[in-house]
Image (spheres, rainbow, N blue to C red):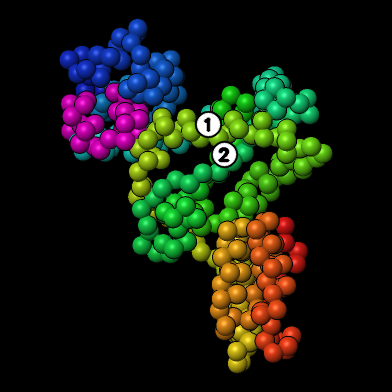
């Protein structure tokens, strides 16, 4: 026997937000961050789990209002004149429904759409070489509340706890691909190397004059992140509570100090190979090497020192005071071979 869904809670036109939704001429962007056609398209696309309860229109409106205004469940409850527990259930139920259609909505273009994206990318870059570009890629940090375990792994270089979102957008700012979940302390390059875009060899190789032309086309992803953060303030301007499913693993060449890295006496060597340490981090470590009398050698191979890190390294090696009684084996050294 097939049971048809039954809605026992209907529109109450006396509620201002619902009366606004019924007004075809009203501007819905100020309250729901989406146009009326976009709202109705979402309502038609989601498939909700419950076979009874509030109408699908109401549930989607409640869901949209919550992230659009960074509002608490209590405020949303008062706005729609429904119980707070119902708001909680609706937000989680519609969230699962949206995740169910995620891969249908966020996907790479094909056919004629792919050609149109290439034309748009070439216009942004002002170079026909980008007519084969599908989109622009970048990452951003989503603020979270510190997890109970391994909270230090989520503390990013911007001095707050986060998880990382890597995304690709087309020339209009439409999202084509997302990769989310890495802790905030992980370097962008490592996130990219572990993403399906990179492992699937979809990432382009730089060519002549690539960077100058690329910057014009790449700016669209920055604008897309800006629009997304402004539109859905609840997600990006507040710290979210999450249950991390991320397992902190040890690499083949661990970043921490093991027994083989520590020598007897004052000649202490600490290796930090292949940790994706950026320019600021390398500069700080080199400065610490100069000021610490017990730290004699610092191995930064496989990291990203940048120009400032390389300059500090050169200055340190040229400094006569960095040597100890002419004994080269105990002198301060900075190994940055094979760095990019």
Q: Inspect the magenta stretch and tell me whether residue 62 lies in it.
A: yes
Percent across and percent down for residue 242 are 38, 51
Pointer 2 residue: 167
Q: Residues within 10 Å of mark 2 (few under 14, many from 20)?
A: many
145 left or right of 162? Answer: left
Q: How many marks?
A: 2
* Residue 234 counted in the magenta span: no
Above or below 150: residue 232: above
Which residue lies at the image location 35% right of the left edge and 17% below the top edge? 28
The single residue placed furthest to the right in the displayed view is 208
Q: Are marks 1 and 2 in contact (CB under 8 Å)?
A: yes
Out of 149 and 57, give the one closest to the viewer.
Answer: 149
Q: Nearer the viewer, residue 119 or 88?
A: 119
| Above/below status of 26 relative to 319 | above
Q: Which quarter of the figure is the C terminus placed in?
A: bottom right
The residue sitting at 48% across, 46% down in the picture is 141
Question: What range is drawn magenta here?
Answer: 58-83
Numbered disc 2: secondary structure: strand
Q: Residue at x 57, y 83 (%)?
A: 293
Mark 1: secondary structure: helix
On the question of residue 308 being in view, the answer is yes
Q: Position of residue 49 (x, y in %)?
A: 36, 33
| Residue 306 % position (x, y) | 67, 56
Q: Magenta-highlighted stretch: main secondary structure?
A: helix
Q: Quadrant of the image for the N terminus?
A: top left
Farthest residue, direction bottom: 265
**Inter-mark Cα distance, 1 to 2:** 10 Å
Instruction: Work out whether mark 1 precedes mark 2 in sequence or the reverse, and give the earlier one.
Output: 2
Which residue is labeled 1 in the image? 224
Foreground residue among 148 and 262 = 262
Q: Residues within 10 Å of mark 1 (few under 14, many from 20)?
A: many
Left-right relation of 175 to 331: left
């Amino acid at each position: 026997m097939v049971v048809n869904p039954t809605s026992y809670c209907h529109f109450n036109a006396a509620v201002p937000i619902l009366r606004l939704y019924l007004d075809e001429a009203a501007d819905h962007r100020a309250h729901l961050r989406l146009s009326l056609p976009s709202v109705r398209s979402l309502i038609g696309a989601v498939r909700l789990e419950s076979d009874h309860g509030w109408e699908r229109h109401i549930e989607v409106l409640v869901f949209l209002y919550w992230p659009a205004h960074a509002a608490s469940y209590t405020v949303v409850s008062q706005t729609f004149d429904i119980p707070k527990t119902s708001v909680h259930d609706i937000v989680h139920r519609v969230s699962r429904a949206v995740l169910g259609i995620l891969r249908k909505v966020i996907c790479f273009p094909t056919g004629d759409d792919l050609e149109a994206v290439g034309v748009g990318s070439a216009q942004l870059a002002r170079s026909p070489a980008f007519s084969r570009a599908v989109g622009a890629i970048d990452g951003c940090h989503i603020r979270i509340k510190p997890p109970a375990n391994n909270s230090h792994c989520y503390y990013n270089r911007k001095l707050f706890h986060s998880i990382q979102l890597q995304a690709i957008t087309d020339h209009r700012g439409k999202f084509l691909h997302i990769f989310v979940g890495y802790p905030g302390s992980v370097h962008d390059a490592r996130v990219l190397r572990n993403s399906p875009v990179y492992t699937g060899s979809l990432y382009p190789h730089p060519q002549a004059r690539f960077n100058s032309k690329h910057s014009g086309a790449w700016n669209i992803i920055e604008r897309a992140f800006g629009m997304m953060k402004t539109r859905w303030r609840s997600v990006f301007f507040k710290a979210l509570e999450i249950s991390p499913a991320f397992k902190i693993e040890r690499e083949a060449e661990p970043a921490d100090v093991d027994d083989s890295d520590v020598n007897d006496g004052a000649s202490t060597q600490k290796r930090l190979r292949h940790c994706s340490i950026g320019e600021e981090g390398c500069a700080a470590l080199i400065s610490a090497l100069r000021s610490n009398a017990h730290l004699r050698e610092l191995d930064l191979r496989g990291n990203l020192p940048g120009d400032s890190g390389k300059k500090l390294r050169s200055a340190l090696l040229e400094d006569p005071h960095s040597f100890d009684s002419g004994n080269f084996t105990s002198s301060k050294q900075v190994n940055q071979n094979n760095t990019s």
